[in-house]
Image (tube, rainbow, N blue to C red):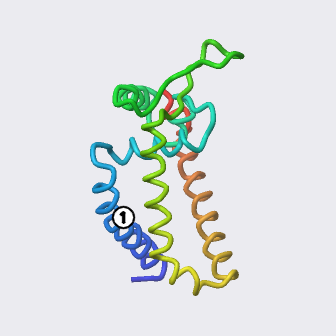
Amino acid sequence: MNKEEQVIRDFRDLFNKLTWLNKIKMEDSLKGFTSSEVHCIEYIGKNVDSNVTKLAESFYMTRGAISKMTKKLINKGILESYQSQDNKKEIYFRLTKQGQIIFNIHEDLHNEFRERDKAVFDQVTEKEFDNMLNFVEKYSKHLDEEIKKLGIDMKSEYLE
């Protein structure tokens, strides 16, 4: 196996381990919510004037899928919709008090996970961080270019 294959394999393994380990605690603490719903709550909690289009772009999901999910979260009492004074046509979302509780639980879990993993990150030098971030940025740009070669506009692909 060459180093490129090893990097891809190791990134995949790392991501899968992290997902599996975090999933146990997330599912226990956030019963009744899917991962997509929790991330939708997180996005709305961190971004003012969130709407279907912004959510669809962020999650690479269709507007229809986002509409379905936000309706479900409204029915659960987690989100409420509103219209801006400036734009009566567009519908935006914000967290209810119950939604803020879910948001806070999720944030607390992320803080707990960061604390759990702090020992590793404390050993990483600034230069190592810069190298890793540089690699991830280069690889991401490369994948964006490969997607463009296929004639796919990722944003419009998920907004249909």
Residue 22 quadrant: bottom left
Image quarter in which the N terminus is found: bottom left
Residue at 61% x, 40% y: name it: 47
Residue 113: % across, % down: 45, 68
Q: Is residue 36 above or below residue 89?
A: below
The residue under label 1 is 22
Callout 1: few (<14), some (14-19), or many (20+) C-alpha neighbours within 10 Å?
some
| Residue 18 visible at all | yes
Residue at 56% x, 25% y: name it: 92
Q: Is residue 38 left or right of residue 85?
A: left
Residue at 44% x, 82% y: name it: 2
Residue 104: % across, % down: 48, 50
- Disc 1 marks a residue whose amino acid type is Asn
Element type at mark 1: helix
The residue furthest front is 97
Residue at 63% x, 70% y: name it: 133
